[in-house]
Amino acid sequence: MTAPTVTASLNASTYAAGDLMTLTISYADPDTRPVTVTIVVTDPQGNSSAPVRVTAVIDPLTVGVTDDSGRAWTKVSDTGAIAVFRTVA
């Protein structure tokens, strides 16, 4: 298993108390991969259904944020590659 990679940036380098802080995180894992399963049902007479496909992700990633001041970070969005979190300074 390869370790995930991550980079992060804040929208500013300094904040006044009460300012909105936005944290953008880019992440990836070379081992994460989608898989598609195709299902066809056939009866004894040879009649078959149309194919049905379902997808899943093997080795999914989760992103969590904590800081040493105990602020609660709220997830604003997460595309599976880029996550955005916000809190108040």
Image (cartoon, helix red, strand yellow):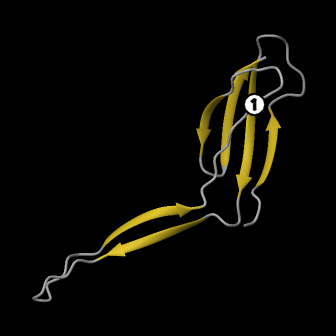
Q: Can you tell which quarter of the image residue 24 is in?
A: top right
Q: Residues within 10 Å of mark 1 (few under 14, many from 20)?
A: few
| Residue extending furthest toward the right | 14
34 relative to 50 in the view: left or right = right
Q: Identity of the amino acid at label 1?
A: Thr
| Residue extending furthest toward the top | 17
83 relative to 44 in the view: left or right = right
Which residue is at 74% across, 20% downward? 71
How many discs mark residues in the rendered view? 1
Compared with 39, 11 (above or below) is above
Residue that carries the numbered disc 1 in the rendered image: 66
Q: Can you tell which quarter of the image residue 14 is in?
A: top right
Which residue is at 20% across, 76% downward? 49
Compared with 28, 40 (above or below) is below
Which residue is at 67% across, 37% downward? 84
Which residue is at 67% across, 47% downward? 82
Q: Quadrant of the C terminus?
A: top right
Compared with 20, 82 (above or below) is below
Q: Assign a secondary structure to mark 1.
A: loop
Which sits in the foreground, 73 or 58? 58
Which sits in the foreground, 60 or 80? 60
| Residue extending furthest toward the left | 45
Q: Position of residue 11 (x, y in %)?
A: 80, 31
Q: Quadrant of the N terminus?
A: bottom right
Q: Can you tell which quarter of the image residue 87 is in?
A: top right
Compared with 47, 22 (above or below) is above
